[in-house]
Amino acid sequence: MVREFKGKAGIGEGRIASFGNQAPTVSRFSSRGPDYININRSLADVLKPDILAPGHQIWAAWSPLSASEPLLKGYHFALMSGTSMAAPHIVGIAALIKQKYPSWTPSMIASAMSTTATKYDMNGDLIQAEGFNLHALYPSTPFDFGAGLVSPSNALDPGLVFPTEYEDNINFLCSLPGVDPAVVKSATGGQCNASISHSHPADLNLPSITISSLVGHQVVQRRVKNVGGKVETYVWSVIPPNGTTVNINPPVFTVAAEEVQNLEIQIIATHKTDHFTFGEIILTGSLNHIARIPLSILVVSAS
């Protein structure tokens, strides 16, 4: 019987678990907004990122045949961080929503997750974001967390959704500055409609509103669909971004199950801002549904 060895062994890649009382936080490696439409870094009128999901130090299944990480070859599980970990959480929640609502489109599923997400952490404070200094946290914005941290249970009962159709996306592409209609048709098969030449990229029917260059005032169009199963009355409230006032027409609306309500959102500049400012519209229903719409506005001029 062998009683001792001359060789020595050690445990590599050891980790020490540490726990804080502030969660979630936005990881420093998580992509930030604003979004750009071209290589010249022209600002886009679309909120990015869309949403926040768990993606840091996730223990998940791993292919033992994978060659991308030699140290993990042969292992069936791994501790990983990144979008590759956050995206599966979103996909899993989307699958649960699709299971409950088989007829829903991808835009309806994405809307349900966005309008029911939370921008607050476990203590009820605004979600913080990691800085480049170790352990440093700073107040975050929708350019850090999008609509907020996804809530699987709330996303299964959103009350309202913002459906985006094929034509909406074609109109969005055609409204982008400098875009050639022939290129849009070649890439998508869709035709730019001259009758909607007055449309603006911010009119894309998303559950958020981003205006990268507000001059004076702008009216943004939105369309919501009642998916709550019963007639419901909604009222709105708003936290306006600094440098703006916000109004919605109609101020109160009642929408039957599966019916659609059009909204006009007027954003008025009160003074110039040197950077994006943020706020939100809250639609509160009589059956306790709540839909949050993040606002991201850069005021170029008040007149």
Image (cartoon, helix red, strand yellow):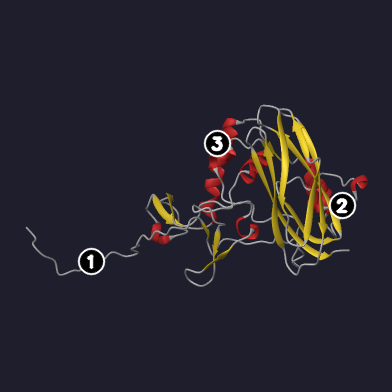
The three-letter amino acid code for the residue at tag 1 is Ala
Which residue is pictured at 50% across the width and 69% down the height? 136
Label located before the other in sequence (2 or 3):
3
Amino acid type of the residue that numbered disc 3 sits on in the rendered structure: Leu
Residue position marked by numbered label 1 in the rendering: 9
Q: Nearer the viewer, residue 93 or 225?
A: 225
Residue 175 percent across, percent down from the top left:
84, 53
Identify residue type, mark 2.
Answer: Pro
Measuring from the top left, give residue 116's x and y in whole percent: 61, 43
- The reply to whether dot 3 and dot 1 touch (C-beta < 8 Å) is no
Quadrant of the image occupied by residue 26: bottom right
Q: Which residue is mark 2?
A: 181
Q: How many marks?
A: 3
> What residue is rendered at 60% in x and 61% in y?
140
> On residue 124, which mark appears?
none
Q: Relative to residue 91, is residue 136 depicted above or below?
A: below
Outermost residue toward the right in this view: 195
Q: Which residue corresponds to mark 3? A: 96
